[in-house]
């Protein structure tokens, strides 16, 4: 568990130097000495601890505690050892009280304070006392502690306290920074961020978490959730559905026969039938298509895609727009010509959906293997019809 490492560190600190106690002289007013009547039972406690007799160690520590007129240092040593022995014995209540006393004494500083604070936070967490776990973990971090396990404990404590706002505040900057650096954020942290963002009605953060999940941990369920979130935005343009499938294909997330069939049909309708042929052929070569009762239908679609691949008119006999024909050239292996035409048409202006055209230019560069130019093109997409959402996701995919 999270706090076990901290607990071991506290135990080592408490028991590591006890052998010196037997030779400590009696100095009546020295700040950092133990009188023999205190040192003797503490040394016996150490022997019991080493023999894994933790309850016996606690009894010996209690004997030391019963000595009257203890100095602050003696009290400090007793509580330090009591906390460590109780933690080893699994007596969380006693350990917590001892750690609380130590922290309240003001004698702990630096790494000692951080270790004890972390162990106490872990005890509170395991006892499901999340408010105190939060308060103690915050103290750890304010003292300069940087261990990621304590940050995780704090986030989990907020989540289990139904405080999703603080979960989002803590998690979002971390996963955003990791994604910008090209590092895959932890999948469970992204799931937690998405869940809390959704509960907090923070739709932008929810979509952002899903974008990172599909970029770094692609699964069918994440794609489904993401596209549902994007499509639910006011103003979403349904003709961008093909672009969602392009993203899935780029990340190897076309998995079902329906995926391949839908994308093939959408590609033909979008004026990129060469892409459609490549998709349906991939479906057959991967073994997803052509293996069940739908084989005849799938073969008919493959034949249609093959026929349409060389056509310059759509299924209704209407000429395919020049921009889409140029995009189709890129899929056909004629990237220099197709990209030059697409760039020229965008520069000329007058396209009906300029942000979608910019998105398709980025996709074309990606297909051509020119990822840096693809990223530049995606960064220029500003549309509020869903194209900018897809462009951001493409940037993540292209940056990997």
Image (cartoon, rainbow, N blue to C red):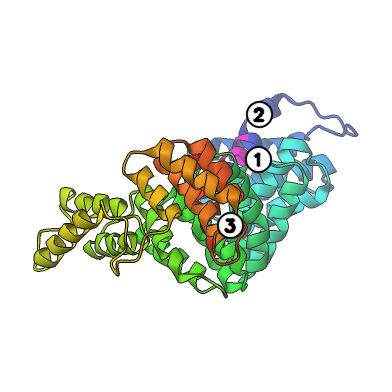
Query: Does residue 102 appear anywhere in the picture?
Result: no
Pick the residue in front: 121 or 163.
Answer: 163
Report the magenta stretch's main SS. helix
Pick the residue in front: 122 or 31.
Answer: 122
Q: CA distance from mark 2 to mark 3?
A: 23 Å
User: Residue at 66% across / 43% down in the picture?
Assistant: 81
Q: CA distance from mark 3 to mark 1?
A: 22 Å
Rendering coords of residue 290 (x, y %): 11, 58
Pick the residue in front: 28 or 141.
Answer: 141
Q: Is residue 237 left or right of residue 44?
A: left
Label 1: how many Cα within 10 Å (few below 14, some 14–19, many 20+)? some
Q: Is residue 180 shown in magenta?
A: no
The residue that label 3 is drawn on is: 92
**Which mark lies nearer to you, 3 or 1?**
3
User: Residue at 74% across / 34% down in the picture?
Assistant: 36
Label 2: how many Cα within 10 Å (few below 14, some 14–19, many 20+)? few
The residue that label 2 is drawn on is: 17
Query: Does residue 383 appear anywhere in the picture?
Result: yes
Q: Earlier in the sequence, mark 3 or mark 1?
A: 1
**Which mark lies nearer to you, 2 or 1?**
2
User: Magenta segment, which residues?
Assistant: 7-12
Q: Secondary structure at mark 3?
A: helix
Q: Is residue 221 above or below residue 23?
A: below
Q: Earlier in the sequence, mark 2 or mark 3?
A: 2
The residue that label 1 is drawn on is: 41
Q: Earlier in the sequence, mark 2 or mark 1?
A: 2
């Amino acid at each position: 568990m999270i706090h076990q490492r901290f607990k071991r560190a506290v135990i080592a600190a408490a028991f590591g130097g006890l052998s010196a106690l037997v030779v400590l002289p009696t100095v009546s007013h020295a700040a950092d000495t133990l009188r023999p009547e205190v040192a003797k039972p503490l040394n016996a406690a150490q022997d019991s601890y080493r023999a894994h007799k933790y309850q016996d160690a606690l009894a010996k520590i209690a004997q030391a505690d019963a000595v009257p007129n203890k100095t602050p240092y003696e009290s400090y040593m007793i509580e330090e050892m009591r906390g460590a022995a109780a933690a080893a014995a699994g007596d969380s209540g006693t350990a917590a009280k001892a750690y609380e006393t130590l922290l309240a004494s003001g004698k702990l500083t630096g790494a000692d304070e951080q270790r004890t604070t972390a162990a106490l936070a872990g005890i509170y967490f395991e006892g499901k006392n999340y408010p105190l776990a939060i308060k103690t973990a915050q103290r750890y971090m304010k003292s300069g502690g940087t261990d990621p396990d304590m940050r995780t404990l704090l986030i989990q404590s907020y989540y289990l306290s139904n405080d999703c706002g603080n979960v989002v505040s803590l998690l979002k900057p971390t996963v955003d920074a990791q994604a910008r650096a090209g590092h895959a954020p932890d999948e469970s942290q992204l799931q937690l961020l998405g869940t809390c963002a959704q509960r907090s009605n923070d739709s932008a953060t929810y979509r952002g978490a899903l974008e990172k999940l599909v970029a770094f941990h692609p699964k069918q369920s994440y794609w489904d959730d993401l596209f549902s979130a994007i499509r639910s935005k006011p103003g979403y343009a349904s003709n961008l559905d093909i672009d969602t499938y392009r993203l899935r294909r780029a990340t190897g997330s076309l998995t079902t026969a329906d995926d391949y069939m839908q994308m093939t049909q959408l590609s033909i309708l979008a004026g990129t039938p060469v892409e459609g042929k490549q998709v349906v052929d991939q479906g057959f070569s991967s073994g997803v298509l052509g293996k069940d009762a739908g084989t005849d239908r799938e073969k008919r679609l493959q034949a249609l895609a093959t026929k349409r691949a060389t056509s310059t008119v759509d299924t209704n006999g209407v000429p395919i727009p020049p921009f889409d024909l140029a995009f189709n050239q890129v899929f056909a292996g004629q990237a220099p010509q197709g990209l030059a035409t697409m760039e020229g048409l965008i520069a000329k202006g007058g396209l009906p959906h300029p942000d979608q055209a910019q998105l398709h230019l980025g996709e074309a560069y990606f297909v051509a293997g020119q990822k840096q130019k693809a990223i530049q093109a995606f960064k220029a997409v500003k549309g509020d019809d869903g194209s900018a959402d897809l462009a951001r996701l493409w940037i993540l995919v292209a940056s990997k």
